[in-house]
Amino acid sequence: MSQEIITLADRVLQVPPSPTLAINAKAKALKAAGEDILNFSVGEPDFDTPQHVCEAGKQAIDDGHTRYTAVPGIPELREAVCMRFKEDHGWNYTPEEIQVCCGGKHGLYNIFQAMLNPGDEVLIPAPYWVSYPPMVQLAGGVPVTVPLDESMDFDLNPETLAAKATDTTRAIFLNSPSNPSGSILSITALKAVAKMALERGWLIVTDDIYETVTYMDGKLPHILDVEPALKEQTVILNGVSKSFAMTGWRIGYSAGPAHLIKAMNKVQSQSTSNPAAPSQYAALAALTGPQDFPGVMKEAFLPRRDFFVKDLESIEGVTCVNPSGAFYVFPNFSAYYGKSFNGTELKNSADMSAYFLNEAKVASVPGVAFGSDDFVRFSFATSMEVIQEGMARIKKALAALEG
Ligand code: PMP
Ligand code: GLU
């Protein structure tokens, strides 16, 4: 056994590896080893990147776009982001207020590296996406979770929020539609956030990565529409990973006050330099080309969501909020905690998810990874056949529990 001579940084030791990526890797390895695994773990569209986008990426290589680019991304792409914001939302941004980065995840990382000081608190409504607390911690900040209630469809309760705010609060995450719950924040909740943020000078980090995947009628409520005066203290995080099935291209973008974007560019210039040049040209084709692709995916997701939720709700003791967006279901299995299989008690979401993997060969992500231990997350960005077979296995596994 090798001796560990080099000690590791405390800030790295305090965070776990991304559980979504870890479970996905495990499910893939089991599958490669010949196990009949149904993988509901990772959240990425089960669609190929549109052909015209792939062609633009290939053309960029042929055209010699294989060198460093401007740190915040090529000007054409930043202009295209501004154009999309204007056309889709009526928001006015200039290229100096845009940073293109290596995926949405990287954008969030840059934001917190640029604006947090040690001990600064960041409010994170829970359930939250797995990477939010570690990103804050890696920047020296303190994540403060704000619990959301299943009985309120995971909407934000202004009183709970007020109780968690302190003098050291610097920022708040909004993620609507949410990963993992699929919930959309109400205008009432957004108004309450806006009021507090304006009074206390918080930065609003609105992660809009699922904005094109909504099943609601009408326009998705947004903090900047509810309170346009918040523009100077809001960063919008978005990207092409979910909207154009481009998870592997690694292109995200942020829009915010110019001085914050400038600071984020400093971080980027000292770390990744720029996102991959051919990927930027592919993203340019995505944002400036036909915009029907997200709608095509949504049409495929909708019947899967409807089946999944209905079938989960038909199981005794299981509840599941109907997701208004994104491609996850987040059922509550806590009625089954305390039951046993072959004498081993399932105590929490980690046990439940491990049981599904071992006994039903179904890969999922335990709710504890999202800060809500009563739940387990399943991605429905997979075929209807897989969902039907998965549900049959889940029901059988639950029926086999004793106690
Ligand atoms: N935010 C949320 C809520 C997500 O689910 C994801 C998915 N990975 C991201 C941001 C980042 O996406 P990516 O880095 O793949 O662009
Ligand atoms: N956002 C996806 C998920 O939650 C991708 C994996 C990740 O980056 O966490 O599964």
Image: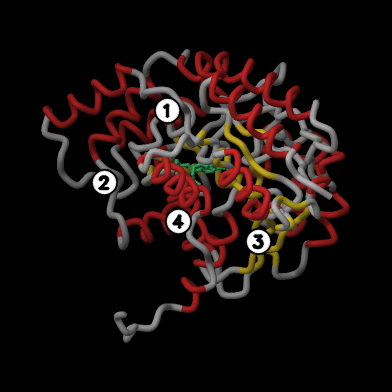
User: Which quarter of the image is occupied by the N terminus?
Assistant: bottom left
Q: How crowded is mark 1: few (under 14 residues within 10 Å), some or many (20 or more)?
A: some
Residue beneath disc 2: 70
Q: How far apart are labels 1 and 2 at the CA level? A: 25 Å
Residue beneath disc 1: 245
Q: Residues within 10 Å of mark 3 (few under 14, many from 20)?
A: many
Where disc 2 sits, the SS reads loop
Tell me, for residue 122, which label it has, or none. 3
Q: How far apart are labels 4 and 2 at the CA level? A: 16 Å
Identify the residue at horizontal 88%, vertical 53% (top origin).
159
What amino acid is labelled 2 in the image? Answer: Ala
Circle 3 or circle 2, nearest the eye: 3
Pick whichever of labels 1 and 3 is earlier in the sequence.
3
Q: In this view, does 146 lie above or below 87?
A: below
Tell me, for residue 110, which label it has, or none. 4
Q: How crowded is mark 2: few (under 14 residues within 10 Å), some or many (20 or more)?
A: some
Q: How far apart are labels 3 and 2 at the CA level? A: 30 Å
